[in-house]
Amino acid sequence: MIEIAESINFAKEMTNLLKGKVIEEVEVLNAPHRFCWLSTSEEIYEQKLIGKKIDHVTSSAHYLRIIFDNGLEIACAEDVSYSYQQKDEISKKNQLILIFDDHMALEFKIKLYGFILLGYEEELKKKYPYYKVALDAIHPIDKKFTYQYFLDVTKISDEKGSVKAALATEQHIPGLGNGTLQDILFKAKISPKRKVSTLSESDKKSLYQSVINTIDEMITFGGRDLITSLYGEPGKYEVLMKNDRANCPVCQGALIKEAYLGGKVIYCPNCQK
């Protein structure tokens, strides 16, 4: 899944490559996907996008937003992958292709599920609550993401619930999903299943710093090594808690991998308490 770090890095990469390009052709749902959500009909995508010039690309949490010179945007989220190559090298197994005036093309593919929305910011905010939350939230690399803000949005000082529930459910911190959460908790030495009622003030501050530092490190190294760039190159941030790792990178003990709160958690029972 595309999370905060990857979204930011894709936005930088795409702005450098795509700014000022004009769309000449659009292809929608070459490979129909049951869990690809569009905001309007395929024909409207073609009608509204052909001839449009890209102004810039930005990110809001896990949403990647391609902004055109008339304010229209494509907003993508969840399990969407992107590739950029010559028009004649593009496959037909995709959900969207934008072909530019220089014969280069941007290809969008959805793996498990994802959104490829088209519209103006205000109309998308009205129609898609998670999009609105992503745009309105203060994100971990923003200076306004203070310790008090962290306490307020996560409700981590409440008496009920687990640490995972506080940090990575109900859009408390949009774009912070399972993939990023595992390393945040490992570096903070806190179990995802630990009850928030047992956290000390020191524990909460450790979690807060780990959220900021881990996401900042992921961004600095071009995203996680599980996600590839527009040219198919993996990010340089080595994920510590991942499926193909059997043992803890610190104590070498066996990692626990189990389903919990709508997704898998991976943690070290020795290092994380």
Image: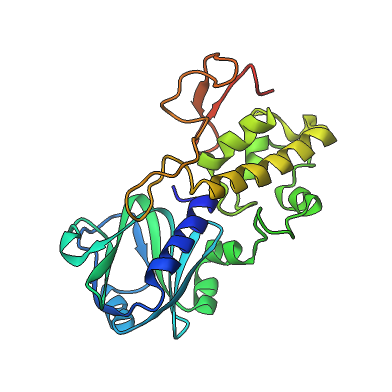
Above or below, 51 relative to 177? below
Colour scheme in the image? Answer: rainbow
Q: Nearer the viewer, residue 129 or 88?
A: 88
Q: Nearer the viewer, residue 89 or 269?
A: 89
The residue under the point 64% across, 40% down is 165
Q: Nearer the viewer, residue 170 or 21?
A: 21
The residue under the point 78% across, 32% down is 199
Percent across and percent down for residue 7 are: 49, 56
**Image-based side of 118 in relation to 144, left or right:** left
The residue under the point 72% across, 31% down is 195
Q: Nearer the viewer, residue 111 or 213?
A: 213
**Image-based side of 95 in relation to 126, left or right:** left
**Image-based side of 136 in relation to 115, left or right:** right
State the quadrant of the C terminus.
Answer: top right
The residue under the point 39% across, 44% down is 234
Give the image quarter of residue 94.
bottom left
Give the residue furthest to the left: 88
Give the image quarter of residue 188.
top right
Percent across and percent down for residue 101 are: 25, 78
Residue 192 visible in image:
no
Give the residue furthest to the right: 201
Above or below, 243 relative to 236? above
Residue 122 visible in image:
yes
Percent across and percent down for residue 175 are: 55, 52
Percent across and percent down for residue 51 are: 30, 84
